[in-house]
Amino acid sequence: MASLTLNTFANQGAPSPADYVHFLRFLLDGICQHVIPGDSGDLKKFRSEISNLSVSLSERSSKQEISSLLQSGMKSLASYNMRTAKLMKEPAASPATALPDRSGAEQEIAMRIEARRDSVCGLVLVNCFASIQTRSGRPIGDEVMPHAAEKLAQHLPAGVTVFRWSDSALPAVVDVDANIAYVTRRFARAVSLNLEKNIETGNRFVLVPITLSFTLKRLSESSSPADIFAELDRFVSASTGEIANMLQ
């Protein structure tokens, strides 16, 4: 059988043993390809288990043997999903800004690398953020960050999430789609804008000028999430003197 889908399998009448085996291998392969990435070592082990089950299928397998193999596959999938669910959590929001925090950004970066999606992580800095907070107070600074994030998101593809990496840094992960120059121009355009935030404090309004700078880190299957995190932290520290933190 050259091609088989769920609909054709269900509607073709009594399937032959070869059809059963082909279809079950089709399902097992789909499970391997589309399972949610978790721990890389655990994922590799799970895919190996499913691959071994697929190899064990034969046209000479009895219904009992096929049923037993499928039950083993479902148990393996359920067990893997339970372990992975413990690693997957909704990104927490920084209480002060309601932006998804660093843990969400780290999870997004790690998932892109695991899924082998050609992507870049752009890290945008609000320049002189420490001075803004010193001059106007931390509440003013925490109003500046979501304003900068909103303007950044307007220049990125729809659906891209802007996170808060540290006090002054906003990362976003974007698909490259074989056009790194286009992605670079998008970030460059966003940071070239002269932004201002008019904030009320007490009985007066404070006009806060905002300038931005950025760096891009290409993500690939050979990238190490830990190395990417360290490079982003070094950029923040070298540019601002700030020690990147989890904004707990």
Image (spheres, rainbow, N blue to C red):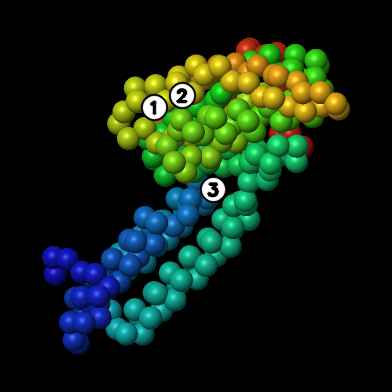
Element on which disc 2 rests: helix
* Label 3 packing within 10 angstroms: few (<14), some (14-19), many (20+): some
Real-space CA distance between mark 2 and mark 3, rounded to the nearest whole angstrom:
31 Å
In the figure, residue 222 lies in which quadrant? top left
**Is 8 positioned to the left or the right of 222 in the image?**
left
**Is 244 positioned to the left or the right of 177 in the image?**
right
Figure quadrant of the C terminus? top right
Give the image location of residue 24, x and y in percent: 30, 71
Position above or below: 142 against 31: above
Position above or below: 176 against 93: above
* Label 2 packing within 10 angstroms: few (<14), some (14-19), many (20+): many
Real-space CA distance between mark 1 and mark 2, rounded to the nearest whole angstrom:
7 Å
Q: Which residue is mark 3?
A: 39
Marks 1,2: beta carbons within 8 A: yes
Position above or below: 143 against 47: above
Give the image location of residue 120, x and y in percent: 44, 30
**Residue that appears at 35% across and 65% down:** 28
Give the image location of residue 139, x and y in percent: 79, 29
Q: Nearer the viewer, residue 194 or 67?
A: 194
Between disc 1 and disc 3, whose residue precedes?
A: 3
Figure quadrant of the N terminus? bottom left
In the figure, residue 179 lies in which quadrant? top left
Q: Nearer the viewer, residue 39 or 157?
A: 157
Between disc 2 and disc 3, whose residue precedes?
A: 3
Give the image location of residue 172, x and y in percent: 52, 33
The label number, if any, that marks residue 183 in the structure image: 1
Element on which disc 1 rests: helix
Q: Which residue is mark 2?
A: 187
The residue type indicated by label 3 comes to: Asp
**Is 157 positioned to the left or the right of 171 in the image?**
left
The residue type indicated by label 1 comes to: Val
